[in-house]
Image (spheres, rainbow, N blue to C red):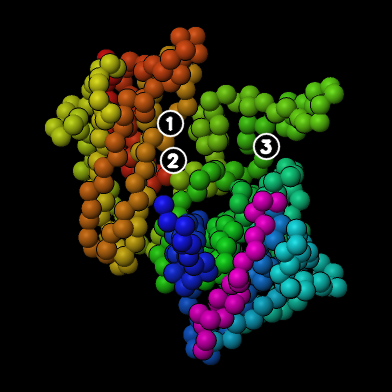
Amino acid sequence: MSSEAHWGSFNSPEHYEAARRIAAAGTVLLKNGGALPLKVPAGGRLVVLGENAIKKMVVGGGSSNLKTKYEITPLEALQEAFPDATVEWERAYVGDTSTSYNKVDTGQDLSDPRSFEQLLSDALDKVRGADAAVFIGGLNKSANQDNESTDKLDIVLPYRQDEVIEALAAAVPSLIVVNISGSPVAMPWADKVDAIVQGWYGGSESGHALAYVLTGAVNPSGRLPFTFPRSVADGPLKTDRQYPGIQEEGKKWWQEYYDEGVFVGYRWYASQGIPVQFPFGHGLSYTTFRYDGARLSKSSVKCSGSFDTESGGDTVLTASVNISNTGERDGAEVVQVYIAPPAGGAERPVKELRGFEKVAIKAGESARVSVSLPRRAFSRFNAQAHRWVVDPGTWTVLIGSSSEDIRCSLPVEIR
């Protein structure tokens, strides 16, 4: 083996291009009443509001603290995107002004002496007569906010942001809200704003990635990896045993219990029939997709939709569907396949995700998408027998664009 050093490179243009592409692909368009893609005429005025438009997110959060060569903020990226327009920023609220953590310092000065009332008044003054307004807020990896060493206390936005958004929505005809967070937040103002984008913590190129999606340079195709409930009360947390948990005598840690059993996450809301703000798997696009021609096949031969629980092989069934891009923009769709168990029998969720496939389709074109469903997709673990089992009966394979947006339903008889 050669002892010669193997040299590589970090922070190359290719690395940052990959970071930009990945962050943009994961950005989720939650709602769009027509304000997006964002357009600002030459000589026009765009007002960007909110602390997260300028706060660098590389610091804080514990292990997510990073040393980076640079970080593009959303404000900087939007100023680049509209060079012929005036892009102004107003803070609107003061959140976490710290800029240093674990020997990493962003070099920013986020101090602001204004009161909440003054900040809100200045924000409302700024948006008057603007061609467009974008509020960029959310969480920031501070204590009790997407921080590894502290739990969230609620899903309500901190720093009175709900009040700010409500006031701005009343003053602006088509307010665009961007939420930056790594976990769900309540959005009581969702029906009052025109568009909502979920932006995450996108790293060095987060600003460019967000601007690309907002302006339509990238057609959004991200999907929610969890449910956005309307409130914490709608979720499964009902006792102190579940949260904050029980501290055992003589021990430093707290024991938390998942008493919801198999109904974790989106399974809880579906099983309880509780409406949510945005469901698991949700995400919109600037184009539209049509689903048709769904079918199940066994191996390469069409079948009636039945198989034995003891069928061998890795793939038992394949669910396929034709996806057509019926809009005017190229885009990508995430086809999601869920299974619903037969009525009666063991306690199981109403439906469970069992596979997905992301496919890029040009405007006006179609593609056939297939997702394999092995025997394990229909199995549950029998603790008494200590093995995976498949319950016989009539199952249903559900194909859709989210856990709540089901486009096709196919029955499967398991003997």
Q: In the image, which is nearer the foreground, mark 2 or mark 3? A: 2
- At 67% from the left edge and 26% from the top edge, which residue is drawn? 257
Residue 138, quarter of the rendered image: bottom right
Residue located beneath label 2 in the image: 403
Mark 3: which secondary structure?
Answer: helix
Instruction: Pinpoint residue 404: horizontal percent, then vertical percent.
Output: 44, 41
Kindly identify the amino acid type of the residue bearing the numbered disc 1. Lys
Residue in the foreground of this view, choosing between 178 and 2? 2
| Label 1 SS | loop
Residue 248 placement, left or right of 406: right
113 horizontally vs 172: left or right: right
Q: Which of pointers 1 and 3 indicates the residue nearer the eye?
A: 1
Q: Which percent across, then down, holds residue 2?
A: 42, 56
Q: Would you place residue 113 above or below residue 287 in this image?
A: below
> Where residue 351 is drawn, which disc sits there?
1
Q: Could you tell me if residue 196 is visible in this image? A: no
53 left or right, relative to 406: right
For mark 3, what is the residue? Answer: 233
Q: State which quadrant residue 395 falls in.
A: top left
Residue at 75 percent across and 62 percent down: it is: 103
Q: Looking at the magenta stretch, what is its main secondary structure?
A: loop
- The kind of residue on which mark 3 rests is Ala
Q: Are marks 2 and 1 in contact (CB under 8 Å)?
A: yes
Give the amino acid at mark 2.
Ser
Contact (Cβ within 8 Å) of mark 2 with mark 3:
no
- SS at badge 2: loop
- Magenta highlight range: 62-84
* N-terminal label among 2 and 3: 3
